[in-house]
Image (cartoon, rainbow, N blue to C red):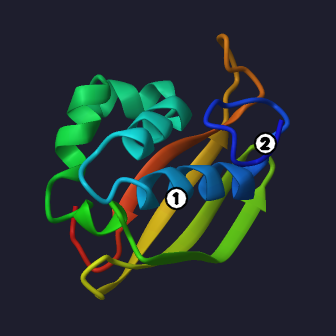
Amino acid sequence: MTPTDPVPTTDIDPDGVLRSVLDGLRRDASGPAEGVRRLYAFASDRMRAALGDEEAFARAFRTTLYAPLLGHAEARVEALERRGDAARATVWVRSADGASVRFTVALARARHGDRQGCWLLSGLAREGVDL
């Protein structure tokens, strides 16, 4: 399996999860599709419980808060810090309309269930926005 596979496996590290999800979201220029499916696939159970099903994820990414990720022109992981079974990253994105936006992404290794041992997204926040 390569780091860009759209399904979580224990072979994909936090950087690979980020690259896979960002690659999918970049391809979603015309609206949420592959990227949101990929994001949902890599979302932790807790994140899924907070946002809902795949369609709820798609609705969330149509909002101005997360829209810069859809069809972005460029993205890079600026910082990735891993401590045990948790990781936090800063991701810079240049949106399709040229805006420069940063997101903080939290990841954690699943402890149980059918995705045990897989790195999953546990949080995503746009920097500069109070949540």
Write the residue at 55% across / 57% down.
23
Check disc 2 and report the residue beneath it: 12
| Residue 98 in the image, given as x and y percentages of width and height | 30, 88
Give the left or right position of residue 89, taking residue 10 as reference: left
| Residue 55 in the image, given as x and y percentages of width and height | 23, 28
State the quadrant of the N terminus.
Answer: top right
Nearer to the camera, 15 or 112: 15
Q: Amino acid at mark 1?
A: Leu
Using a 10 Å C-alpha cutoff, classify the residue at mark 1 as few (fewer than 14 neighbours), some (14 to 19) or many (20 or more): many
Establish if 29 lies above or below 121: below
Q: Give the mark toward the camera: 2 or 1.
A: 1
| Residue 30 in the image, given as x and y percentages of width and height | 25, 54
Q: Secondary structure at mark 2?
A: loop
Q: Based on the displayed image, in which of its 4 quarters is residue 103 positioned?
A: bottom left
Establish if 5 lies above or below 28: above
Write the residue at 28% across / 37% down.
57
Check disc 1 and report the residue beneath it: 22
- Nearest to N terminus: mark 2 or mark 1: 2
Q: Secondary structure at mark 1?
A: helix
| Residue 70 in the image, given as x and y percentages of width and height | 32, 60
Q: Amino acid at mark 2?
A: Ile
Q: Based on the displayed image, in which of its 4 quarters is residue 36 positioned?
A: top left
Establish if 81 lies above or below 12: below
Q: Cβ–Cβ below 8 Å for labels 2 and 1?
A: no
Write the residue at 64% across / 58% down.
19
Establish if 74 lies above or below 113: below
Using a 10 Å C-alpha cutoff, classify the residue at mark 2 as few (fewer than 14 neighbours), some (14 to 19) or many (20 or more): many
State the quadrant of the C terminus.
Answer: bottom left
Write the residue at 67% across / 56% down.
87
Measured Cα–Cα span from mark 2 to mark 1 = 14 Å
